[in-house]
Amino acid sequence: MHDPPDRTGPAHAEVAEVWPRDGRIRVTGRVVGAAPAGAGTLIARVRGAPDTELRLPAEGRDTRFDAALPLDELAAATPEGERVWDLYLALDGQEDALRLGRHLDDVHGKKKIFTYPAQTSGGRRFEPYYTVQDNLSIVCDGEVAR
Amino acid sequence: MTIRFLLLNAYAVGGTVRTVVNQANALAAAGHDVEVVSVHRHRAEPRFPLHPGVRLIPLVDGTAPPSRWKRPLAYRRQRRPSRLVPEAEVRYDRFSRLTDRRVERYLRSLRDGVLITTRPALNLLSARFTPSSVVRVGQEHLHYSHHKPELAREIDRWYPRLDAVTVLTAADEDAYRQQLGAGGVRVVCIPNPLSEQGTPPLSALDRPLVVAAGRLVKGKGFAKLIKAFEPVAQAHPEWQLRIFGAGPEHDRLRELIHERHLYNHVYLMGATQEFDRELAKASVFALASRREGFGMVLAEAMSHGIPPVSFDCPHGPREIITDGQDGLLVPLGDTAGMTAALTRLVEDRDLRRKLGGQAAEAARRYAPDRIRGRWEELLAELLAAKGKAGRSGGAGAPYGL
């Protein structure tokens, strides 16, 4: 599952940790290549359905961010079928949303190496994963090809 | 004088092939005439490249199998089970009537020089068929007690005919000497050499990274290591454990990592072509095996100045590591002890530096030129002894005698 190439750039939200547990998916990290802004918004967009969007508050301090997606909200917003949510961070007072990803470490082929447990909510299964471009997405009811 | 190595498959990938190719290359680079003879061939070129001076000779060429119509005899023989190799040999399925015939003919054709065989079936065949005018050395990569009783009986019976049996550890040396000593065969311990020539790059020991490596099988104890690392990750969340290697336990280990919410701290890295480079990033190396043939990877880690933490399992670690001096040994299976040892090194950078420095020093005894020197010494002694005894040999006794 490739994500659209035009949505990644040098400025991005570098993921440090992903915690899929206790009914939510929490992501922490830091903003790279953009001015530090403190708080912001975590945006999840369904791939192939540009109007379906979920916006959640993200805490921030300097370049750090910390945000969580509650699974019940995610389940309620996910359209039928196998779906992929791509994750972005919009900083307060800044135009562009930054793609969440992990590009600054020395691990190649993260899709196979950085794997996370799936959780279920509302009869649907959610699993965070890294795309082949090392961006962070969440697959719903689908298998991550490894 | 020619030094020959007889391997089951010099074209394959594996620990034995790698060390034998390293030995052959080191001897060729030192100006010796070296030949590598491979019972099987299944691809055009060997995976571990040979020194240009080394001749490579396959006995049964699987890339050009005998035609049923043009070579009906060979065709039939390759499908019939071996009569010369004991069924208790782990790789019995790789031998056939065709390999019996080709190997026996090759062994009987030798007149002088050295023949080094590299696994039990080949050692036994060499003891039976290689003329005694040849210096015959049998390498054992396994501990004596790991052989099935039927194979051990064959070893007891035939190995005394060899000029020397070489083993990897002092513990093996004791075991084989006890079994074979009365037969007059020399048992000598020569460890495997490090793969890297020259001075391996030293780790800076400043990354919060523990590395482990090996095939992902139960015996390597990675599940235990992951459990031992859990408290370390909780107390020191910036530290990571990276496990290099592939194998049948992969999915089970991933499950364990997920269950314990260690997915931000423990990574299954897969197999890598650049293991040396990845290894050199580590600040601590960990080994949690239930047993090892030798534990070469410990010596590799130490050669990069990385302090190792290892279970004190049979048979390698305690000969490679001096506890508290150049690494830490933990009683076999003691998970809490493993956690404590990892924590000591994680929390104490000075201790890492001290043990790491001594580890690099200690690993020098496995440097390829040192190990080559030990082989040259042994072969020279065996050849000299052969010269004194005169050419009294002739062909070995035929099968069944």
Image (cartoon, rainbow, N blue to C red):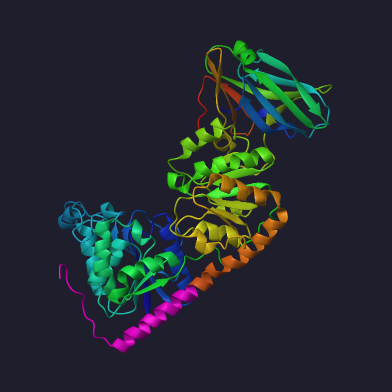
Q: Nearer the viewer, residue A131 or B182?
A: B182
| Residue in view at x 74 percent, y 35 percent | A10
Answer with the quarter of the image where residue B64 lies.
bottom left
* Picture coordinates of residue B395, whole percent (x, y): 21, 77
In the picture, which quadrant includes the C terminus of chain B?
Answer: bottom left
Q: Is residue B50 above or below residue B90?
A: below
Q: Position of residue B129 (x, y in %)?
A: 23, 71
Asked if one can make out residue A102 in the rendered structure from this viewpoint, the answer is yes
Relative to B68, residue B103 above or below:
below
Question: Which quadrant is home to the N terminus of chain B?
Answer: bottom left
Total of numbered circles in the picture?
Answer: 0
State left or right for residue B137 relative to residue B191.
left
Q: Is residue B377 magenta?
A: yes
Q: Dominant secondary structure of the magenta stretch?
A: helix
Is A141 magenta? The answer is no
What residue is rendered at 30% in x and 66% in y?
B123
Q: Which x, y percent locates residue A36?
A: 83, 31
What residue appears at the point 72 percent right and 21 percent down from the top-left corner? A42
Residue depicted at x 26% and y 57%: B149
Q: What residue range appears in magenta? A: B372-401
